[in-house]
Amino acid sequence: MQSILHTAKELLLPALRPGGTAADFTMGNGHDTLFLSRALPGGQVWAFDIQPAALKATQALLDNNSAGGNVRLILDSHSNLDRYIQTPLDAGVFNLGYLPWADKAITTRRETTLEAVDKALPLLRVGGVLVIVIYPGHEEGARELHALLNWAAGLDVRAYNVLHHDFIAAKAGTPHLILIQKNG
Ligand code: SAM
């Protein structure tokens, strides 16, 4: 079976088109940033992280792949996304949690994650998508999952299609995915 991150990319892809806009709200090693950069030639990608090491790793990944001319790397919390993005978004991705090779205490947190998804949602154009991957196998991830499922279940179904992807026959802690698509 394909990984949840592969599924996330497949769900993002239909919303992406040349000249479009997207945000990687948790840059990390830059794999999602590179994916978005390649999918949006002539477009604009914003990528956020609070760790300088993430920006360094992402810049190196983009450089090694001769990509990134359409990317702006931002050293700031995704909860401040409204300071940077004022235009409609075709897609946004949150791959929550921490960087496996870095300090695991530097993880996404329920409060700032909720603030960020609340700010990102109104930016979606009609047909645009937000994909959120959540890892409940650690304490803060379990809190994020609970909060995000509540938040997503409360969205206006006339305005959004909301999907929750879960592995129902799997060991505890496997990742969940929430997809939100803005309706016409
Ligand atoms: N998408 C990344 C990739 O392709 O490698 C992996 C992301 S990693 C699981 C989660 C990242 O979120 C970490 O790099 C962490 O520093 C970052 N992060 C934590 N809190 C954040 C916040 N408030 N705003 C933006 N990024 C944050």
Image (cartoon, grey):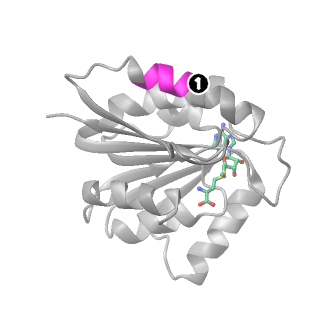
Q: Residue 51 location, x and y as percent?
A: 75, 50
- Residue 91 appears in the figure: yes
Q: Residue 126 location, x and y as percent?
A: 20, 39
- The residue indicated by pointer 1 is 146
Ligand 1 closer than 8 Å to the CB at disc 1? no
Q: Residue furthest front?
A: 169
Quadrant placement of the C terminus: top left
- In the displayed structure image, the side of residue 36 where residue 14 appears, left or right: left
- Residue 70 appears in the figure: no
Residue ID at (36%, 48%): 91
**In-front residue for pair 42/159:** 159
Q: Judge the density around disc 1: few (<14), some (14-19), many (≥20) Cα neighbours within 10 Å.
A: some
Residue 19 sits in which quadrant? bottom left
Q: Is 103 rendered above or below residue 150?
A: below
What is the span of residues highlighted in magenta in the rendered image? 147-152
Query: How many marks overall?
Result: 1
Q: Is 133 rendered above or below residue 60?
A: above
Q: Residue furthest left?
A: 184
- In the displayed structure image, the side of residue 162 where residue 158 appears, left or right: left
